[in-house]
């Protein structure tokens, strides 16, 4: 029974990838330690799966570049928790969402403090 159940879970995951819904559930997303630095949160939450290890982008997500021309730290902190809302109202983000086969994942699993640390790190690294 167990092997069949996991095969079904794998198929469900593949289906999500094919449907372009991203696959946050099947790529190991680990809870970062409460005091994790931005780079560690990025890695633990598996952002590199779509944006690449150095933010260079993949077929699933855009390169992370020139972020400070679009985001304040506060806005980016908020965005990470609810990217769908932003993609609906911001034309540039909406176009980006359609251009990649992934979807920016919601990170409302992270505390606001952790999202802020991550946002600060992203802006420093990809200004
Ligand atoms: C399943 C793929 C996927 C994952 C995982 C993912 N993203 Fe994204 N991300 C996208 C896509 C696609 C977009 C384009 C906008 C959209 O879809 O809403 C995006 C947009 C963004 C943007 C806005 C870029 C800009 O030009 O303004 C930032 C910043 C970002 N992601 C950071 C992250 C961080 C940090 C993580 C991990 C905590 C993460 N993403 C995880 C796919 C992903």
Image: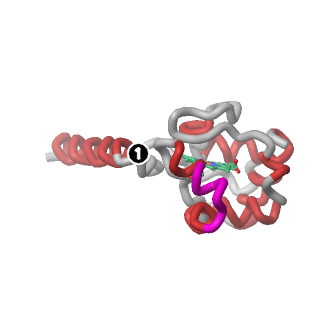
Tell me the residue at 80%/56% (across/down).
Answer: 71
Q: Nearer the viewer, residue 71 or 44?
A: 71
Q: Nearer the viewer, residue 110 or 2?
A: 110
- Dot 1 corresponds to which residue? 26
Left or right, residue 27 beside residue 35? left
Q: Is residue 64 above or below residue 104?
A: above
Residue 2 at x, y percent in the picture? 19, 45
Left or right, residue 83 beside residue 11? right
**Residue at disc 1, CB closer than 8 Å to ligand 1:** no
- Image quadrant in which you'd find residue 47: top right
Extreme left residue here? 1
Q: Is residue 71 above or below residue 54?
A: below
Tell me where the magenta segment starts and ends, as one range.
89-95
Residue 61 at x, y percent in the picture? 57, 41
Residue 32 at x, y percent in the picture? 64, 50
Tell me the residue at 67%/37% (across/down).
Answer: 63
Left or right, residue 57 beside residue 13? right
């Amino acid at each position: 029974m167990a092997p069949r159940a996991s095969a079904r879970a794998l198929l469900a995951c593949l289906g999500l990838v094919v449907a372009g819904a991203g696959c946050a559930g099947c790529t190991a997303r680990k809870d970062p330690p409460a005091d994790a630095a931005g780079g560690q949160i990025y890695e633990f939450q598996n952002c590199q799966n779509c944006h690449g290890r150095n933010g260079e982008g993949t077929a699933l997500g855009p390169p992370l570049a020139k972020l400070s021309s679009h985001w304040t730290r506060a806005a980016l902190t908020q965005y990470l928790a609810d990217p769908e809302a932003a993609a609906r109202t911001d034309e540039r983000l909406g176009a980006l969402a359609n251009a990649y086969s992934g979807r920016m994942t919601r990170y409302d699993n992270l505390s606001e403090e952790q999202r802020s640390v991550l946002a600060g790190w992203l802006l420093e690294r990809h200004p």
